[in-house]
Amino acid sequence: MFEARRRRDPGARLVSGAGFLGAGVSLWNYFNEASGIAGTPGAMLVIGSSALLFLVGFALRGRSRGVLSLLALVLILGTTFAGWLLESPTLLVAMALALLGWLGHALFRPRREFA
Amino acid sequence: MSRRGIAMKRALLAAALALGGHAFAQDRTWAHFNGDLRAQKYSPLAQITPENVKNLQVAWRARTGDKSDGSGKVPATDWSATPLFVNDTLYLGTPFYRIFAFEPDSGKVKWTYDPKAVLEALTQPDLKNRGVAYWQAAAPVIGAACQKRVYVGTMDAKLHSVDADTGKPCQDFGKGGIVDVNRWNTLNAKWPLSLLQPPTVFKDFLFVGWAGKDWALAEAPPGTIFALDARTGALRWTFHSIPPEIAAKTGTANVWASMAIDPAREILYVPVSSPSPNFFGGNRLAPIPLGTSVTALEIATGKVLWSRQLVHHDLWDFDTNAAPTLVDITKDGKTIPALVQTSKQGFLYVLDRTTGEPIYPIEERAVPKSTVPGERSSPTQPYVALPKPVVDDQWPGVFWLADLASLGYCSRKFKELDYEGRFTPPSLKGALSYPATIGGVEWGGGAVDPAKQIFVVNNSSAAQIYKLMPRKEFDAAAKVGGMETGGYFPMEGSPYGIQLTTFQNWLGMPCWNPPYGSLSAYDLKTGALLWRKPFGQIQYWGFYMPESWGTITIGGPTITASGLVFIGGSMDSRVRAIDLKTGEVLWKHLVPAPAVALPAIYEYRGRQYVAFAVGGNSILLPKVSDEVVVFSLPK
């Protein structure tokens, strides 16, 4: 039953999905000359942080691991700040979704004790 | 139209051509490096306005293929070519010294010309090109070739002339369409006279300056301008900036930037750079009155009409580096034929262009004395209070964030340096120079709206450290740190080499307070500063810094009659349209690299276009491109 609820943890799924979206957008920015940040270390950094967010979101599903949850929040806020400095609005949208997901996960995630 | 009307129109056209002397009255064309011969960078076109500029979009873009990031055998490219629109064609020179002729509304290539130039950094560290020049015969022979010509120079001093309609070499120019300017390089010929700036064209004259190798030698080729016949390339006259009795001991004081012409008075205005070696003057203690000056020459003969030295005994490499802008100023009810000379040292010199006398006062002020053995610095320097300098007198102080990030390195380093304000001379201990040799204002100069008499100029506010090192110490340090790439420049032949570094912390953050670059507008009638705004954004590792910081800028603005300023020139690879009244950015567009070239504004078949050559510049960012991007309003 817990496994089923874990899969349903929509907040964590959103974090993961937003991380995937962020990594995709950042990859596009890295290789697209018109992005203004093509080939820059900054773009590479957010590819990495978004990809990591995708993995952390995946690992978070249905779990209340404090460290992972904190790591996800740090990644979201850090990537948001980087996205703001990189002037990448799509990455900001992705991180806004991730934050919503993180809040959803933190507030409404399935509790192990109820499983 | 009646026959009489047609005849009248033809007569007027002929008169306009004759009066203009191929000056191309400021109309729908952009026929010269600075738009027109007076270097106003002004277009009377007004289809694009402050109200509709937000709708501006890419009309066409084209790539030349001529770029290098320097990672291979070909040196990096700096593309600073103003596109020329004339003869219903958009002409561009490339950093590989090729010429492209584009259809002005589609970007389709009409023809290209390849001079098969040597692609080596023979003088400047990068392959540079600031474009091409255009000439047309006053009385063209119908059906004959080369009645209209385009010229391009190369790093190894070859000047090429091709037919503007076909791109074929003009056989009557030099040998097979090429003049080797280096054949006149006869004194201290340590390197070729690189022709990176296109010639200035007036009537049947080509005025050719040249660029050399900076900071390398004490004894170098002396500054010269060659006036050539536009058809044959024959030498008409030569101008020398250094007195012959000391020319062998020094060099440069050349004219490497663009020039301006007063077509009515037939006067050529030239910005003369500093003599060599650039940061030590012990081997050139005799006066060089034309060094670091703006100088007026009689076009027919090259005779000096007047000259005003802007820096005495220059020890800062404060080359006069842009064509003065010629404009008539109404002051105290009188119309004064004036010029505005921008400068690396941050002053704007507003002079009567017929006499060289200042319209706003220039005073000689006492400046710090050099402590370097063998040096004898000038006790005073010309100082301009009005118009307010683009760079303040005192450096803006240590930037707390850079200081914090470097655990106090910036403030500790500042305490070690010699600094006594503007014109602090280079020293053995290390002297802070603010403004520094990168400006102030660079070769793009300023632009003027001649009707409103408003002058607009972009500038950098940069601090650098100049440390002279005795020869032995220098050689040892340069061996470890790296000649040129490590900031060590030999000034061979002088007792000192120089270590020149930008004052920044280990992260590359500037140690001084922002803004690092600004855009300013002045009322030339009063000299008053109308507005000043931080310009552009620093981009580091892809991250954009706050707009209030501005950015180091290279390139220059253009102005339209509708009250817009178009400018690239920033580190953030954006081109912008700015409200002339307020300085507010009304439109910006991302391009593939910093667009340091002056934009060209033209009209073709009823549409106004704004064209940028987007090539990058290694001083701003290691980012290059080979693209020309042209904007217009939607159809």
Image (cartoon, coloured by chain):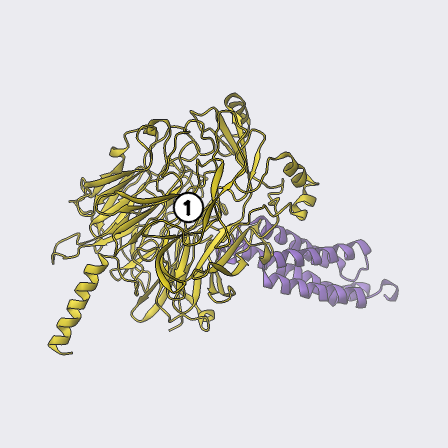
Chain colours: A purple, B yellow
Read off the residue under disc 1: B78
In this view, B147 is above or below B96: below
Residues B405 and B33: in front is B33
State which quarter of the image contains the C terminus of chain B: bottom left
Question: What's under tag 1, amino acid-wise?
Answer: Asp
Task: Tell me the chain of label 1.
Answer: B
In the figure, is residue B94 to the left or right of B528? left
Rendered residue at 73%/67% (across/down): A10
Pick the front one: B601 or B7: B7
Hey, which residue is sitting farthest right in the picture? A113
Q: Most extreme residue toward the bottom, as rendered?
A: B2
Occupied quadrant, residue B434: top right
Mark 1: secondary structure: strand
- Measured as percent of width and height from the top left, residue B195 is found at 32, 41
Mark 1 surroundings: few (<14), some (14-19) or many (≥20) residues within 10 A: many
- Residue B392 location (% of width, % of height): 55, 49
- Placement of the N terminus of chain B among the 4 image quadrants: bottom left
Q: Is residue B177 above or below residue B275?
A: below
Q: Position of residue B612 (x, y in %)?
A: 40, 57
